[in-house]
Amino acid sequence: MKDTEVMDSDQAENWTKPKERSSLSELNHSMKVPLKGSTFRKFLAFVGPGYLVAVGYMDPGNWATDIAGGAQFGYSLLAVILMSNLMAVLLQSLASKLGIVTGHDLAQACRNQYSKPVSIGLWILCELAIAACDLAEVIGSAIALKLLFGIPLLYGVLITALDVLLILLLQHKGFRAIETLVIVLVLTIGACFAVDLWLAKPDAGSIFNGFIPTADLITNHQKLYIAIAILGATVMPHNLYLHSSIVQTRQYENTYKGKRQAIRFSAWDSTIALTLALFINAAILIVSAATFHKAGMTEVAEISDAYHMLTPLVGTTLASILFAVALLASGQNSTLTGTLAGQIVMEGFLDIKLPPWLRRLITRLIAIIPAVIVTIIAGEKGTEELLILSQVILSLQLPFAVIPLVKFTGDKKIMGRFVNSAWVKILAWCVSAIIVVLNLFLIYQTFMG
């Protein structure tokens, strides 16, 4: 069969049900990929989705664990951040591969491969995870607004609901507009922490040693708990659904050669973007270690405390201001990807299409109502505890996204010639097992302690 055939004979026909519509149908294959030109020019056409995915690895939910890890244990948990990032690179590359090869996102794949009760169950779990992630974004943005402008938390939570208008505006301007804004905000976060790193003056030797794993990561129970929390907050389940869909916004050739090239460029895009996310996560921990841990303030674990203590320790208010600006950019960035993930999951699992504004409003209400209630009853302390709880909920859903992804991409009936090689299968299942076991342990420790 010629390479120019639309599909390989051992591919799409093996799906148990046909795909009624494309994922994000209004954006599907909307961005052209040059057929001629340099490799770099073709690669640039694929740059974007990786940064939307990377947002989930630097959202407000990650900040508390990074701050706590740096304050309590200095630089020693940098090895955990590195390991988490390597796991994320592998899983996100599998997610993009699934979308490119099959034309189905992960939600559609689950609906086609599993029975209706199982699919509905997976959908409910995924919606809970997206709501939990959205909750972290709401709280993170509200805290940033309070720190920067003195806006009370309750009003800040309500203000974040207005970002639905920004989403609608960007969607009308095309997917590249969304990607451009996300990239600008990611670079803003990176620039803020680059300056904070310079102001904190961390020890270079300690940073290098921190990336080398040590035995006390296992033997020290407190360190192990924080390490698992970092792992649990890093790999986001909704990102796997998101990535498998948004890679299909590119108009790559629907041939073996075209798909192989798309898989390669998408992997480069996500790897580079996740490397930037690694820098930002590591920077949060390093700043915490170089300031709070060095000063003996090992109990610092909350975002607001970190903001207020940075200025006297570093000697300039600039450090705290940049910290809060980065937090606001992180929260707003996450709302963009949360919007798309929610739309993808509902359309994929249920095969129903709601207007983006209605889907976003539903998701926002699910996140805002608990945040408003807790803010009224418990104040700032309660909202930060709610942020931690949101990460536990994400951990609960993670296995139900990772295991189907690894299973589908390792199935030749689904992937055809693009099926995972033996070593990728082994590595992917090992990573899945590690993530599942550690997240289950995190959940156990959270509820027991």
Image: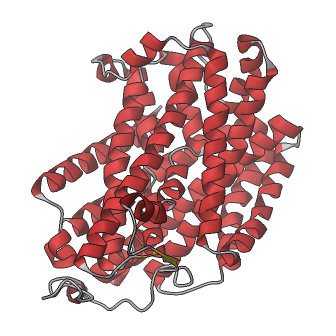
Residue at the outermost front position: 37
For image coordinates 48% across by 74% down, the residue present is 249
Q: Where residue 94 appears, x then y in whole percent? A: 30, 60
Q: Nearer the viewer, residue 215 or 201?
A: 201
> Does residue 138 appear anywhere in the picture?
yes
Q: Quadrant of residue 402?
A: bottom left
x%, y% of residue 373? 76, 52
Image position of 65 (left or right of 15): right
Q: Residue at x 81, y 43 (%)?
A: 145
- Quadrant where the N terminus sits is bottom left
Q: By what rule are the colours in the image chosen?
A: secondary structure
Q: Residue at x 58, y 8 (%)?
A: 294
Q: Is residue 350 left or right of residue 192?
A: left
Residue 88, image x, y percentages? 37, 48
Number of labels in the image equals 0
Residue located at (23% from left, 52% from top): 428
From the viewer's perspective, tell me whether residue 114 is left or right of residue 62. Answer: left
Q: Is residue 400 visible?
A: no
